[in-house]
Image (cartoon, helix red, strand yellow):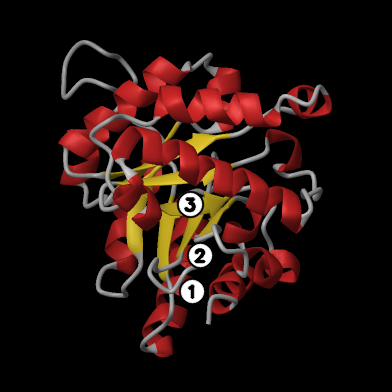
Amino acid sequence: MSSSRRPLIAGNWKMNGLVADGKALAAALAAKRSDAGDVAFDMLVCPPFTLVSTIGDTISGSGISLGAQDCHTAEAGAHTGDISPAMLKDLGCEFVIVGHSERRTDHGETDDLVRAKAEAAIAAGLQAVICIGETEAERDAGKTFDVVRTQVQGSVPSVATAVNSVVAYEPVWAIGTGRTPTTDEVQEVHALIRAELAGIVGAHEAEGTRLLYGGSMKPENAMELLALADVDGGLIGGASLKPDDFWAIGECCS
């Protein structure tokens, strides 16, 4: 972490949670955040669409930010089943994840589509959490840098700034597997991402942009990962569903 970039601890709940357990999880986090007073990090939760409004009400006033897991590129229209950035903003969202590896894999999302979603989110006044990362096959083939470079160049819009965008590196092979790259490997990729960002948004904005690590961060490894120069927080999956674990990751930023 750099002292010039405030860490962001973001929870991606994925397709988990009904109303009762979602409210219980959010309430537990809100209580921890409210009791903590001043902390050295920002905290974000991204529940499924069905819980966005409920969770927004539950965390209101706690200092925890609300986000969503995806959005459409259009503001409105004939797009059955989709959610626009304007709708998310209307519900109180401040952030939206775009280009998560599971969206890229399950729904065939391309870099061009991810960039368009990020542009739409930014235009609606949301902060875009733009996800990139290589698969296990790509890593084993020695293509990590090529894949990451291509995804950054293709997915990050020219309108991105340190204020309206966050980039999350998620080595796909490490998500939910308990495996993680070495800290040297994580730092190497994050440094590459920042260098590539500079070519899109300029060195000043790239230096201020928060880069999150998204490959099985948990309390046991968070301190080591968050100590890296170009890791400015985490995009947390499984551990974000456990309030004690999620909060413990945040405390590693102190």
Residue 206 is left or right of residue 169, and the answer is: left
Tell me the element at label 3: strand
**Which residue is denoted by mark 1 in the rendering?**
28
Q: Position of residue 24 (x, y in %)?
A: 48, 66
Q: Position of residue 180 (x, y in %)?
A: 77, 50
Report the mark closest to the observer, 3 or 2: 3
Report the mark closest to the observer, 3 or 1: 3
- Residue depicted at x 44% and y 48%: 47
- Residue depicted at x 55% and y 58%: 231
**Which residue is denoted by mark 2 in the rendering?**
25
> Mark 3 packing: few (<14 Cα in 10 Å), some, or many (20+)?
many
Q: Position of residue 152 (x, y in %)?
A: 47, 30
Location of residue 31 by image quarter: bottom left
> Mark 2 packing: few (<14 Cα in 10 Å), some, or many (20+)?
some
**Which residue is denoted by mark 3 in the rendering?**
211
Separation of residues labelled 3 and 2 (CA atoms): 26 Å
Q: Is residue 52 visible?
A: no
- Residue depicted at x 66% and y 67%: 222
